[in-house]
Image (cartoon, rainbow, N blue to C red):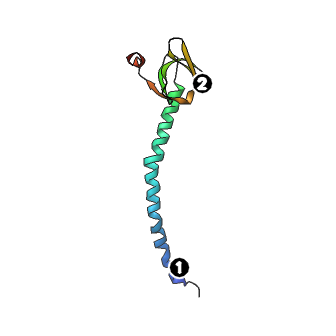
């Protein structure tokens, strides 16, 4: 009627072995997905903190220009002569090498 004690005692080793693939998958996800994203987010945050006037940047919307003013959450980007656009700071995707805008 009920499960015998002997059967319940032998099931523990197979139960542990059934969790091993799940643990391996979690470890793979950590090293292949989670860890690189956290590292990239830290690099992006430090790049945003070091932005200063005169830097050449590209935004996620495709705007390329020179930073003229940096605020707490917004920056001003000069995209052409006498044309300044205000964008949110987190939309800056990359910091371009100096002189990139002249070569475009």
Residue density around tag 1, few if under 14, some if 14–19, many if 20 or more, within 10 Å: few
Pick whichever, 68 or 28, lies toward us: 68
Residue that carries the numbered disc 1 in the rendered image: 8
* Circles 1 and 2 in contact, beta carbons < 8 Å: no
* First in sequence: mark 1 vs mark 2: 1
The picture places residue 78, in percent across and down from the top left corner, at 52, 16
Against 88, residue 12 (above or below) is below
> What is the secondary structure assignment of the residue under circle 2?
strand
Which disc is residue 51 wearing?
Answer: none
In the image, what residue occupies the spot 48% across and 27% down?
A: 62
Against 9, residue 60 (above or below) is above
Residue 17 picture quarter: bottom left
Pick whichever, 89 or 61, lies toward us: 61
> What is the secondary structure assignment of the residue under circle 1?
helix
Q: Quadrant of the C terminus?
A: top left
Pick whichever, 29 or 103, lies toward us: 103
* Residue at the farthest bottom position: 1
In the image, what residue occupies the spot 60% across and 21% down?
A: 71
Mark 1 vs mark 2: in front? 2
Q: How many badges with numbers are in the image?
A: 2
Against 93, residue 20 (above or below) is below
In the image, what residue occupies the spot 51% across and 82% down?
A: 7
Residue 2 picture quarter: bottom right
Residue that carries the numbered disc 2 in the rendered image: 74
Q: Quadrant of the N terminus?
A: bottom right
* Residue at the farthest left position: 103
The picture places residue 55, in percent across and down from the top left corner, at 48, 19
Pick whichever, 3 or 92, lies toward us: 92
The picture places residue 75, in percent across and down from the top left corner, at 57, 22
In the image, what residue occupies the spot 45% across and 63% down?
A: 20
The picture places residue 92, in percent across and down from the top left corner, at 51, 28
Q: Work out how far the residue at label 1 is from the one at label 2, CA to CA, in angstroms.
A: 63 Å
């Amino acid at each position: 009627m009920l499960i015998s004690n002997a059967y319940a005692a032998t099931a523990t080793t197979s139960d542990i072995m059934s969790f091993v693939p799940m643990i391996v998958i979690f470890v793979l996800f950590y090293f292949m997905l989670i860890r690189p994203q956290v590292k990239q987010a830290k690099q992006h945050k430090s790049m945003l903190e070091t932005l200063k006037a005169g830097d050449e940047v590209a935004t996620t919307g495709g705007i390329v220009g020179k930073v003229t003013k940096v605020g707490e959450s917004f920056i001003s980007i000069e995209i052409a002569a006498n044309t300044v656009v205000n964008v949110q700071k987190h939309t800056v995707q990359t910091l371009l090498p100096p002189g990139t805008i002249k070569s475009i």
